[in-house]
Image (spheres, helix red, strand yellow):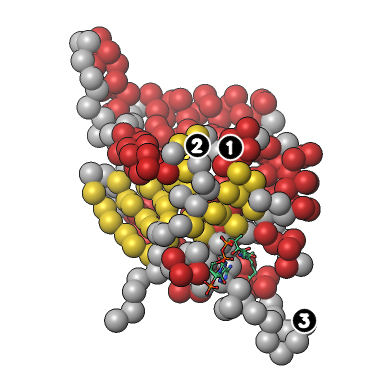
Amino acid sequence: MAVASILYEARQGVARITLNRPDVLNSFDTAMSLSLQQILAEVARDTTLRAVYLTGAGRAFCAGQDLAEAAPSGGPGVQDFGAHVRKLYNPLVLALRRLPKPVICGVNGVAAGAGANLALACDIVIAAEEAAFLQAFVKIGLVPDTGGTWFLPRLAGSAQAAALALLGEKLSAARALELGLIYKVCPAGELEAIGYGLATQLATQPTYGLALIKELLNASAHNSLEQQLELEAEYQALAGRSEDYAEGVRAFLEKRKPSFVGK
Ligand code: T3D
């Protein structure tokens, strides 16, 4: 019987997604990418799901493109990786960035190539101490994709981004934290409790407001200060009309914990 390349479970408002090709360090073949795209579309539609936890099975998070599937056939110049990237990777990055709910990534081991950049596309990245990040593309004559050339300079600054992309060196989780690529590092044994725990906690928060925050942060990458201030005003108007705002203020005044419904 074929084993699913993605494991998926929905519980307590959290969509738990596990990349599951451990024998090849959860590298992406076509089926795994299409399956992840389908799951993310379902999660976006399902209003009972209010946060996502993304991780990998076995000792790695994801080693990027499955190089056996992408091995050159018919000599140089024959394959169209442009079409491949547009079909398999770009939709994943956009789905994660546009998902109207927070995505926590638990990087349990090595994250290489498209796998590293998939992690960086998530909202909050927590890595096990043993995890590592590498822009492996250059080692095989390719360029960073899956948003790497967009995320790296924004997260780590242009000097670090250039070195990471051009050298393709393995970055420890601790160094990734120092550079501002990720949010937190923890012992491997605590990753599940911290990462999944955060997703569970976020699933009880004002989901509509969280979605607006995501959109604002996405927009800030290309907006002027004036544009961003205006967008904040517009989105504050939207947030201020939400059920969760009314509940949040009521709970504050009544000195009790708010019970957010996500709307
Ligand atoms: O197709 C397109 O559209 C182009 C787009 C490309 C996007 C990309 O992601 S390009 C970058 C692709 N990824 C890589 O170049 C990384 C290749 N892997 C590695 O460099 C190393 O495996 C790691 C540094 C990630 C981990 O090293 P290590 O020593 O911990 O593990 P290992 O022994 O190298 O790998 C363990 C097994 O996984 C091994 O198989 P085996 O010998 O046990 O049967 C290895 O072949 C397999 N594996 C690891 N990465 C991949 C892979 N198999 C297929 N594709 C992989 N990417």
x and y, in percent, of residue 90 in the image: 58, 60
Q: Amino acid at mark 2?
A: Val
Disc nearer the start of the sequence (2/1)? 1
Mark 1 residue CB less than 8 A from any atom of ligand 1:
no
Q: Is mark 2 within 8 Å of ligand 1?
A: no
Q: Mark 1: which secondary structure? A: helix
Q: Position of residue 109 (x, y in %)?
A: 50, 52
* Circle nearer the N terminus (3, 2): 3
* Residue linked to disc 3: 77
Mark 3 sits near ligand 1, with its Cβ under 8 Å away: no
262 or 158, which lies in front? 158
> Given contact means CB atoms under 8 Å apart, are the residues at marks 2 and 1 in contact?
yes
Q: Residue at x 34, y 62 (%)?
A: 7
Task: Identify the residue position indicated by label 2 in the image.
Answer: 185
Secondary structure, mark 3, is loop
Query: Residue at 42% of width from left, 52% of height from top?
Result: 55
For label 1, the residue is: 174
83 displayed left or right of 12: right
How much space separates mark 1 and mark 3, taking CA atoms? 39 Å
Front residue of this view, candidates 200 and 262: 200
